[in-house]
Image (tube, rainbow, N blue to C red):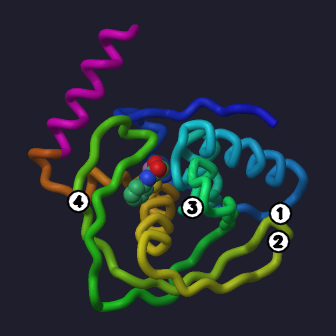
Amino acid sequence: MALLSIITAPDPRLKIISTPVDDVNGEIRKLIADMYETMYFAPGIGLAAIQVGVQKRLLVLDIIGKGDKDNDPQPLAIINPEITWASDNDACYEEGCLSVPEHYADVVRPAEIKLNYLDVDGKKQKLHADGLLATCLQHEIDHLDGILFVDHISALKRNMILRKLLKQKKMAS
Ligand code: GNR
Ligand code: NI
């Protein structure tokens, strides 16, 4: 296994639209294992391949997480997700993103979604998600389409956050 480095905004690579995985092979399973390690280490509750520079439609998540002593980890790998249904009612969560470090904002999204995807064995699966899982899945699927949570908030707040991150990058370089 290997820790992968996470791309942070602003970076044009985070805006790329990822392409479907055509074969769930050993290379993909190695990437998934490395993404789990990277997500738990960060720590985060989800990670999309594009965040580690791989432009493929795949993500991992664990909304329980390794840090929770009372619950076992529930790692989930989702390949080529397709949202087939979204509820009319919305939910609002304060979101964060490993690619937008140390900034948080309320984001409104459909409260429930249904999803088709391939699992780590390449098998077709369906999922009906609500709560934090539904929010996290939509956040990750947005990444596959080059969208960040800050794209859902006001331009004023978004530009404030992106300007701060850019300034930090310039200071560090
Ligand atoms: O760790 C994460 N927490 C989080 C909190 C609320 C809504 C979405 C997320 S996902 C984020 C990890 C990440 O950046 N995934 O792309
Ligand atoms: Ni994110």
1 or 2: tag closer to the N-terminus: 1
- The Cα atoms of the two marked residues, 1 and 2, are separated by 8 Å
Q: Position of residue 67 (x, y in %)?
A: 58, 48
> Looking at the image, which residue is at 45% across and 81% down?
130
Which stretch appears magenta? 158-173
Q: Is mark 1 within 8 Å of ligand 1?
A: no
- Closer to the camera, 3 or 83? 3
The residue at which mark 1 appears reads as: 23
Which of 151 and 69 lies nearest the eye of the viewer?
Answer: 69
Horizontally, is 103 left or right of 52 in the view? left
Residues packed near mark 4 inside 10 Å, few (<14), some (14 to 19) or many (20 plus)? some
Q: Label 3: state its secondary structure.
A: loop
Q: Amino acid at mark 1?
A: Asp
Between the C-alphas of marks 1 and 4, the distance is 36 Å
Q: Is residue 122 above or below residue 57?
A: below
- Is 160 colored magenta in this rendering? yes
Residue 91 quadrant: bottom left
**Could you tell which of marks 4 and 2 lies nearer the N-terminus?**
4
Residue 106: assigned label: 4
Is the Cβ of the residue at disc 1 closer than 8 Å to that at disc 2? yes
Q: Quadrant of the C terminus?
A: top left
The mark nearer the N terminus, 2 or 3, is 3
Residue 127 in the magenta stretch? The answer is no
Q: Earlier in the sequence, mark 3 or mark 1?
A: 1
Q: In the rendering, which numbered label is found on residue 122?
A: 2
What's the distance in space between the residues labelled 3 and 4, CA to CA? 20 Å
> Are there few (<14), some (14-19), or many (20+) residues within 10 Å of tag 3?
some
